[in-house]
Image (cartoon, rainbow, N blue to C red):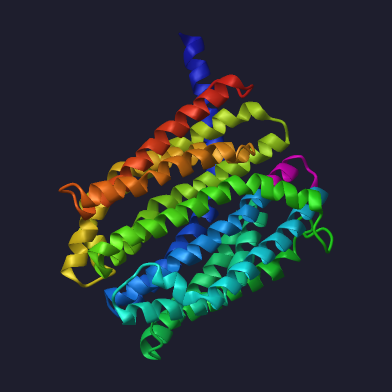
Amino acid sequence: MLKYITNFLKKEQTYSAVGRKLLKLAFPIIGSYLLHMTYNLTDMIWVGYLGSGAVAAVGSAGFFLHLGWAMASIVTVGANVKIAHSVGAENMDDAGRYSTSGLWGIGSIAILFTSVFLAIPEQFIGFFQMKDAAVNEMATSYLVISAFGIIISFVNLLFISIFNAHGKTKISFKASVIGTLINIVLDPLLIIVFEFGVEGAAVASIVGRTFSLLFFLSTMKKFENIRFNGLFPKSSKLKTLFAVGMPAAVQRISFSVIYIFLARIIADWGPNAIAVQKIGVQIESITFMIVGGLMQAVTIMVGHSYGAKNLTEVPNIYRAGWRIAFVVAMVTTAIFLLLPQTLFSIFVPEAESILMGKDYLMILAASQLFMCLEMISAGVFNGLGKTKIPAAVSVIFTSLRLPGAYFLGFYTFLSLNGVWWSITGSSILKGIVLYFLLRAYFKNNTFGKF
């Protein structure tokens, strides 16, 4: 009995030590994510003063911008994982080569998306078939102006991956603080005072991200080990980045595409429904951002352990991460159930939109715990370089949202709430399936006891 208690206490001390290290890495990432959310929420609050039509316009254009950011993850995820492996193996030359290759890769993707969005913006916005001409015009203008900032946004994402992989998550946080503060100041000035409307929101975001990028460039010079190695990319490194990052990119791209088609289904209930979905996603991202930061910390720590060939530490990292995520999930679930109307009333004044939003958050509350379980499990797989597993689970079950939303929305009494239930149901399934896949993976490999 004494031996059992001693072993238990040792395990608890191990989990606590790993948990503290995770939180040390995760807090700046969480802060960066929350600041990124603040970017979006600030836009939504000020754009919301222009009415639900303006929110729907920004939301519609935002779907395609998110598609571009998803494509960028081909490089950013691959860079994060492979640089973390190199840092764990104490091979800084390789880390620098992956950074250089990542810069060329991210630049190429940015130029591609900028060119396409500038060439045919009306065709993208026209996909939603919104009947309000003013909303279509605002959405097109927002997309065109935002396209000019894509290269800045993408390179920022790469720098975040590079610094985080080196364990310098505080630098990414500081860059986010600078960009967000500038955006917060500019939003009301450009949107309301100078009456630029949604175009002002797009300009404010570009200016904020420009200052974030300048901070990264100036800070990189202060770190001897964090650098670009060589002027041109090494083909083998670029290929590896794409091989590791592609599954995650497919996952995020499919997620964006699915949400574009989902928005097309939602559009049948009018601009208010689109606005509710856009705002609801931002509110739900409270959970996503906090646990997403923890997920990145798990990926970094697992990546370092993998590079150092210390695989027995991986289960401890998973357990510590899941314990923290569980607490977050419980808190956000309670908030969504108890304060849905209060949260939505911050962003839109219309009573109809607030009532729609209440239903959205109360239904989505059921999936918060499972979403967290999925993310922590995915963080472990990604840190090991096994990005295909969580990507496959996500693509398969997220795809089910479309037929589920169509059937529940149009052929049951649930109506629009059926769309929200299709989102929640798929999240629950993803969390359960990925947990059991990770459990099986641990059992079949030399990672110690699950």
**Residue at image coords 52%, 67%:** 177
Q: Is residue 236 left or right of residue 85?
A: right
**Residue at image coords 33%, 63%:** 279
Coordinates of residue 202 in the picture (x, y in percent): 47, 77
Q: Residue furthest bottom?
A: 194
Answer above or below: position of 414 versus 121. Answer: above
Q: Is residue 183 left or right of residue 71?
A: left
Q: Is residue 269 left or right of residue 305?
A: left
Q: Residue furthest top?
A: 1
Is residue 443 located in the magenta-colored stretch of the structure? no
Coordinates of residue 23 in the picture (x, y in percent): 52, 45
Is residue 86 located in the magenta-colored stretch of the structure? yes
Q: Is residue 450 left or right of residue 46?
A: right
- Residue 260 vs residue 213, the one in the foreground: 260
- Which quarter shows the N terminus? top left
Magenta stretch: dominant secondary structure: helix
Instruction: Choose top left, top right, bottom left or bottom right for residue 87.
Output: top right
Instruction: Choose top left, top right, bottom left or bottom right for residue 281.
Output: bottom left
Instruction: Choose top left, top right, bottom left or bottom right for residue 130.
Output: bottom left
Residue 24 visible: no
Answer above or below: position of 351 versus 82. Answer: below
- Residue 107 vs residue 328, the one in the foreground: 107
**Residue at image coords 70%, 46%:** 82
Coordinates of residue 50 in the picture (x, y in percent): 30, 80
Residue interval drawn in magenta: 81-91
Answer above or below: position of 172 versus 198. Answer: above
